[in-house]
Amino acid sequence: MKGTVGELGEFGLIRELTSRLTTTPAVRLGPGDDAAVVAAPDRRVVASTDVLLEGRHFRRDWSTAYDVGRKAAAQNLADIAAMGAVPTAILLGLVVPAELPVTWPTELMDGIRDECQVAGAAVVGGDVVRGDTITVAITALGDLRNHEPVTRSGAQPGDVVAVTGWLGWSAAGHAVLARGFRSPRAFVEAHRRPEPPYHAGPAAAGLGATAMTDISDGLIADLGHIAEASKVRIDLRTAAIDVPTQMSDIGQAVGVDPLQWVLTGGEDHAIVATFPPDVKLPARWKVIGEVVNPSALPQVTVDGAPWDKAGGWDHFGDAEPEDPAGSGHPAG
């Protein structure tokens, strides 16, 4: 498609974007009216929202519009799964400059649509606005299917800590991109398009998970939220955490201990949960630590000691020196 967003106009852009969408049985009324209607058999709706800003959360010279769409959807749908819910729908808020080629938002929508299909959800509506900086705002919805939500506050002393999904891959991919390279491709693609284990969230709830979250800000940082909410200390065992050989090779090439990426790198959207010690976990879950004791100073320790190195993401913290976007958070 040729032309710019400004030449197509607001309603022409909306028609073009919605024409690319698919639906699911949960969608009773999709785009085209004042609001969408999504079935909520459980009579409770799990909701999460997130915003991606060009230059802070993604760079167009690193990622295609399709990549950004996949990533934007994935990080929101992962939040739904981490509550033990099944994703059902996404709403999109999009800010774009008038001079932006129409192909960019249409490819973005293709990425969002395809990631939704992976998770079993659908795009049901949204809004487009003219602005100077590309901004992608996503609201995701989910259904608990008559189960209780798995929050961050339920971890108990004696629970094991287990993870499923990739750890440190996105951070390693960011390090590769930041140095002007595009390989090893698996790590670069992990940064551009995370692959959350969506089905593992509801499955963990069925197994009796006591607390759960997805890893968006880093393993230590996100487990820290569970420790604080549950008022416990969580201890990680580095001997139980796998560091792929190729990740070690990247670390050696750029002068970074790859364990740093595994423990503090965000945006993999793996799922980490705590389980009672007698639960038999499927092979996809890797036990990497335990909930040690109630704590007046909730924290995450590594091999019994506090983690005293930098890491984890805070949107209002200092920028990481290696981040070309100046954000501190991997931009990709």
Image (cartoon, helix red, strand yellow):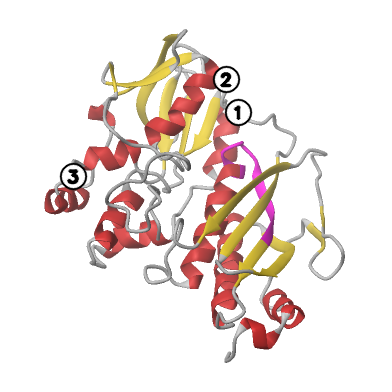
Q: Which residues are magenta?
A: 80-92
Q: How many numbered marks appear?
A: 3
Residue at left offset 55%, top offset 29%: 207
Which amino acid lies under the numbered mark 2 shown in the image of this protein?
A: Gly
Q: CA distance from mark 1 to mark 2?
A: 7 Å
User: What kind of element bears circle 2?
Assistant: loop
User: What kind of element bears circle 1?
Assistant: loop
Which amino acid lies under the numbered mark 3 shown in the image of this protein?
A: Val
**Does residue 65 sit above or below 197 in this rendering?**
below
Q: Which mark is drawn over residue 154?
A: 2
Query: In the depicted view, which residue is nearer to us: 225 or 189?
Result: 225
Is there CB contact under 8 Å for labels 1 and 2?
yes
Query: In the depicted view, which residue is nearer to us: 138 or 286?
Result: 138
97 relative to 281 in the view: left or right: right
* Residue bearing mark 3: 256
* Residue bearing mark 1: 151
Asked whether residue 90 is drawn in magenta, I would say yes
User: What kind of element bears circle 3?
Assistant: loop
Mark 1 or mark 3, earlier in chain: 1
